[in-house]
Image: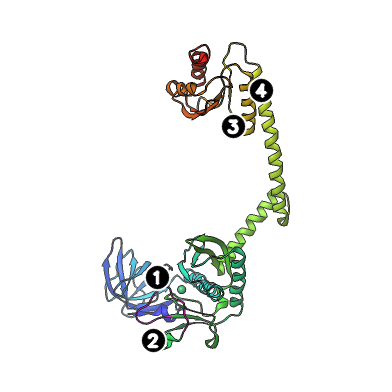
Amino acid sequence: MKKLYETDSYLRECDTLVVSCTPGKSGFCLELEENLFFPEEGGQYADTGRLIPLGKEGQPEGDPVYVLDGKLQKDGRILYHTETALPAGTRVHCILDWEKRFSRMQQHTGEHILTGRIHSVYGYSNVGFHLSDEGLVTLDLSGPLTVEQAMEMEVAANRVVWENLPVQVLFPSREELESLPYRSKKEIEGQVRLIAIGEKASYRDLCACCAPHTARTGEVGSIRILSVQNYKGGTRLGILCGLRALEHGQREWKRFTDLAKSLSTGVEDVADSVAGLQQDLMKEKGRVAVLQEQGLLRDFRDIPEGEPAILFTEGPLAPVALKNSFNTMAGRAEGYVGIFQGSDENGYTYTIGSTRLDTRPLGLLMKEELGARGGGSREMVTGRTSAPRKEIEAFWRRAAMGGTLAQI
Ligand SMILES: [Zn+2]
C-alpha cells in the first residue's frame, strides 16, 4: 500500500488495484493498492473522487464508483467509503475532486504559515484545527491574542505568501529530527513527516503534518483572519485562504454596497449613517413614550365614577410610559389601579398597585381566580394572565371594589 498523496499533492489521477471490498454500515469499504485520495486526518476531511473500472486492455469498463469518504484505520490501512462495490482485483482509474482538494491545500498551508508566524513571535502552539468546507476554518492557539495582534500576524503571514517560498515535505531520520525545531501536536511513533516552509538554511516553519500542501506559499493566494475569540484560555481564530478568502471578500463587498445603497449613502459613510439613524430612533422612542403616557392618563381620567380603575391597552408600552402613568394613577386613586397590556387572544401582562392598600392579597386572588402568574411587593404586583378582558373586569368589580379586599 502506497500513500501517493504524501509525496505528490498535485497528482490528480492514477491507475491502481482494488485490494479488498467489504460491506460497511452503508455502502462498501474499499481498500486500494495506491492511495491518491487523502483520508480524514489531522483536522482535514477526506478527499472525494471517482474510480473508473478498467478492462483487460486498460479501457474504461462500467459505471464510475464514487469515493465519498476515507478513514485511516488503527492497523494503518486506508478504507474508502463507496456506495457500490468493486470486486478485489479490479483495476481502476482514480480521479480526484481536484478543486476541492486544492482549496483545502490552500487553507491548510495558509494555516501552517499563520501558526508558524504566531509561534515564532508569541511561542503559542496550535492545539486544535478544523478545516471545514463551510463557514470559517478554525485554529485554536494556546495563548491569548488581541484583535490588533492578530491583524499584525495576518500581515506577517501574507508577507510569507508574497515571498512565494517553497513548501517541502521532509521525512527526516530520528537523528536529523532531534536537531530540527519542529512544531507537533503529539508524540509521533515511526516516521515523522514534516512540512517545511522556506529555504533549507532558514525555514520559516517546520511542522509535523500528514496532509497534502501547496508546493509554494504563493499558491495560498491570501490569508485572512475573520474572527478572533477567547477560547479555553487561549484564542480561536477563524480564517480563510485562497479562493475562499476572495469569495468571502466579494460577499462582504456586495453586502456592504447594498447596505450603503439602502441607506442612500456611500460605503465610507455607512457607520455615520447608522449612528444617525440610531439617534433618530432614540428620539422617536422618547416621543412615543410621552404620547403613550398622555394617552393612558387621559383614559384614566375618563373612567366613570364607580367603574374599575383599570386600563387595557394592546401595547407594548414603553417602560418609562408605563412607570410614569402607573405612578400618577396610583397616587390619585383611592383603591387599586391596574394596567393590562395585551389582548384576549394573546393574554395580558399586568401591573397593579395602590398607595393605600396592600396589593399582595389581590395578586393572590388573581392567581386563584384568573389563573394569573406573578408576584411583587405591598405597593405593586406584576404578572401575566390569559383570562379574557370581560372576566378580568368582572373579577375587579367583585374583588377589588366593594369586595372584602377593598375594606382591608
Ligand atoms: Zn497540518
Residue receiving disc 1: 41
The mark lying in front, picked from 3 and 1, is 3
Alpha carbon separation for disc pair 4 and 1: 70 Å
Residue 174 circle label: 2
Q: In percent of the image, x 44 and y 20: which residue is there? A: 369
Task: Tell me where residue 339 appears, x and y as whole percent.
Answer: 57, 24
Q: In percent of the image, x 55 and y 78: which residue is there? A: 217
Colouring mode (rainbow / by chain / secondary structure / one colour): rainbow
The mark lying in front, picked from 1 and 2, is 2
Secondary structure found at label 1: loop
383 vs 93, nearest the viewer: 383
Alpha carbon separation for disc pair 2 and 4: 87 Å
Of labels 3 and 1, earlier in sequence is 1
Of labels 1 and 2, earlier in sequence is 1
Compared to residue 207, the image places residue 389 above or below, namely: above
Residue 316 circle label: 3
Residue receiving disc 4: 297
Magenta range: 180-193
Inspect the image, locate mark 1, and give the three-letter code of the amino acid beneath it.
Glu
